[in-house]
Amino acid sequence: MTEMIAMRDAYGRALVDLGEQNERVVAVDADLASSSKMNLFAEAFPKRFFQMGIAEQNMTGVAAGLAALGFVAFTNSFACFATLRTTDQIRVSIAQPSLPVVIGGAYSGLLGGKTGKTHQAIEDIAVMRALPNMTVVAPGDGVEVRKAVFAAADHGGPVYLRMTRDPSPVVFDEGYDFKIGRAVLVREGSDVTVITTGLMVGRAVEAAALLAAEGISVHLLHVPTVKPLDVAAVVAAADKTGFVVTAEEHNIIGGLGGAVAEVLGEQRPTPMKRVGVADVYGESAPNDDLLQKYGLTAGHIAQAARFLMERRAAHTQP
């Protein structure tokens, strides 16, 4: 049976371990510590934990002030609040001076525990990657979350760390070497390239297995850092097969699909299909129902790949 780990659990434990190693690490919360698991840090280091209440803008400003004084500040809230409610404060107080603040966005994407469209973050990657100096990281599993926490603390500038709520499949082992700005090849293939970010990598692994049974070979590239994008890896992956599917639990506008299209449009024009939320808001429903309705399952990734394969076949017919 596939091991399952919730990203927020991995985040909470990693933050405690980081705090034990680095006394400059502080945590600033907006009344969601138990949901994000930042409460583990609060219990371990009460003097380095600051509770702002339901005041995300103030949380962001306090974190910026702490960072300006030499601390490495982690903020945490639901992704929709951590990025969108606080955009002006992040832009002026964190991104412009390029301060070492790690913005933890919990409950990202559609699967927020039936919280509905007000709490679903499908625009956060687009907003954060548009800010100069901002690094955007969307780990694919709990193992990668842990490694990203430590990497973000050492980064020296602002980082948006995007995480999901519920347990998800573990894709990487403990020996996996995570580096900010580097994509990782998950599977070699020859027919179609699938490029993922966040937990869509697990669904893409499933899709690759489905397609392999049909004789379609998937070249799978996982992109945990949406900004800065690993341009060389993306171009090489596109060149490998000549067809690209991108998969993300985010609006297809402005996220991974947009970033990949921007790069390939300039450097290696390639037929593409973007799997993601089709520029609509979500609703409250069980996880599986949401994934099916908004086209985010392994089956949808496989169908996008089949579409491109059919396009190839049509173009090669005499």
Image: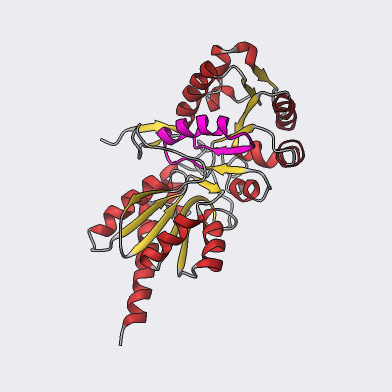
The residue lying toward the viewer, choosing from 208 and 113, is 208
Q: Residue at x 56, y 57 (%)?
A: 259
| Res 257 visible | yes
Please name the residue shown 51% across and 45% down the image. Answer: 181
Residue 91 lies left or right of residue 315; in this view the side is right
For the N terminus, the quadrant is top left
- Decide which of 165, 316 is in the foreground and name it: 316
Instruction: Say how many tags the image has.
Output: 0
**Image quadrant assignment for residue 97:** top right
Q: Which residues are magenta?
A: 138-165
User: For residue 253, what is the image quadrant?
Assistant: bottom right
Quarter of the image where the C terminus is located? bottom left
Looking at the picture, does residue 118 appear above or below residue 280? above
Is 134 on the left-hand or right-hand side of 36? right
90 is within the stretch colored magenta: no
Q: Position of residue 220 (x, y in %)?
A: 36, 54
- x and y percent of residue 298 in the render? 36, 52
Image height of 74 relative to 118, above or below: above
Task: Tell me, yes or no, whether the highlighted magenta stretch contains residue 153.
Answer: yes
Front residue of 280/58: it is 58
Relative to 30, is 252 above or below? below
Location of residue 248 in the rendering, given as x and y in whole percent from the top left corner:
48, 51
Q: Is residue 7 left or right of residue 79?
A: left
Indicate the position of residue 39 as horizontal and vertical percent values.
Answer: 55, 19
